[in-house]
């Protein structure tokens, strides 16, 4: 049983198998599963079919399980400002497919590469207008903009998305691993971001990101865990790794770093 205030989770690619097999494996070990649906092209897509969605719903109902859905591409309008851009179209396919799961949140990136390395005031304002419009369009499909959780991306200034967030009531995904990768103070960032955060991603850095939390200094991990517990964070906490070993060793690292008497051993232990 998870005694933390938040919903402990991980991704749908922990064992080398399809999404449904991973969900069966993780059910009872976690409270949320991030369905990673990056491949949504017709020929090689991994979107669940109608029967799989029904099974995913049944597993969730039987195990007090929720899902977060990671949309497949950085969201943007077409260059002419119209919604007919591949990222918008793929977002709609994913949302239409997964709406019956009643996801906790749809996690997404906003594509700001065109203005990241310098833009005039008018260019930046235009990009911000397009970002807000993208979120409104996709939020309507998702059942409301609060279902959308905009994620901070590595390589971007901490305040890059703030003008957009001030104009639309989306929630946020705080990716602690991205903050660590860029050398930012994750606890200071969480202090300001938590009131509108519905999802947290966490992962270690070891020659790249999305590695086991065993690679994170214990004091850094403990500071994050303490912050979440003391603020009674009630959202989803996703260990965003992609192998069984990284998942299990991350669980062990969280338990070792925790200042509390709470143990995640029951969550992370294998069940025969």
Image (spheres, rainbow, N blue to C red):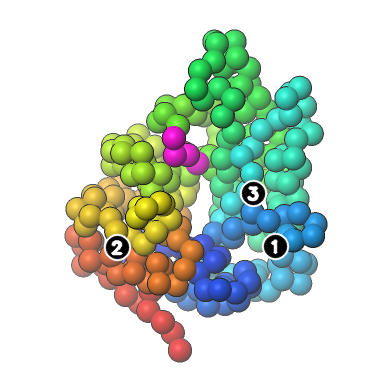
Nearer the N terminus, badge 1 or badge 2? 1
Residue at the (23%, 66%) spot, across then down = 256
Residue at the (22%, 61%) spot, across then down = 257
124 or 101, nearer to the observer? 124
Q: Would you place residue 28 above or below residue 204 in this image? A: below
Nearer the N terminus, badge 3 or badge 1? 1
| Cα distance between the residues tagged 1 and 2 | 30 Å
Residue receiving disc 2: 214
Q: Is residue 226 left or right of residue 244?
A: left
Place of residue 52 in the rendered image (x, y in percent of width and height, measured from the top left)? 71, 71
Residue at the (53%, 77%) spot, across then down = 25
Q: Are marks 2 and 3 in contact (CB under 8 Å)?
A: no
Q: Quadrant of residue 39?
A: bottom right
Residue receiving disc 1: 46
Residue at the (29%, 59%) spot, across then down = 215
Q: Is residue 33 left or right of residue 247?
A: right
């Amino acid at each position: 049983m998870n005694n933390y205030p938040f919903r402990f989770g991980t991704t749908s690619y922990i064992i080398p198998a399809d999404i449904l097999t991973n969900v069966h494996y993780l059910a009872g070990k976690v409270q949320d599963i991030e369905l990673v649906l990056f491949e949504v092209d017709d020929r090689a897509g991994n979107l669940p079919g109608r029967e799989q969605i029904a099974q995913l719903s049944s597993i969730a109902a039987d195990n007090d399980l929720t899902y977060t859905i990671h949309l497949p591409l950085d969201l943007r309008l077409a260059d002419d400002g119209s919604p007919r851009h591949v990222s918008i179209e793929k977002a709609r396919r994913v949302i239409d497919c997964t709406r019956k799961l009643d996801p906790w949140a749809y996690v997404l990136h906003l594509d700001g590469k065109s203005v990241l390395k310098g833009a005039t005031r008018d260019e930046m304002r235009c990009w911000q207008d397009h970002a807000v419009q993208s979120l409104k369009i996709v939020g309507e499909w998702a059942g409301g903009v609060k279902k959308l959780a905009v994620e901070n991306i590595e390589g971007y200034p901490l305040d890059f998305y703030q003008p957009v967030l001030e104009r639309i009531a989306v929630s946020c995904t705080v990716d602690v691993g991205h903050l660590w990768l860029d050398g930012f103070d994750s606890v200071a960032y969480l202090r300001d971001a938590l009131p509108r955060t519905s999802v947290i991603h966490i992962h270690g850095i070891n020659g790249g990101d999305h590695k086991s939390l065993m690679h994170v200094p214990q004091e850094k991990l403990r500071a994050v865990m303490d912050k979440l517990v003391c603020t009674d964070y009630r959202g989803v906490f996703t260990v965003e790794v992609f192998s069984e070993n990284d998942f299990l060793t991350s669980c062990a690292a969280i338990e070792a770093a925790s200042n509390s008497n709470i143990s995640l051993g029951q969550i992370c232990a294998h069940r025969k």
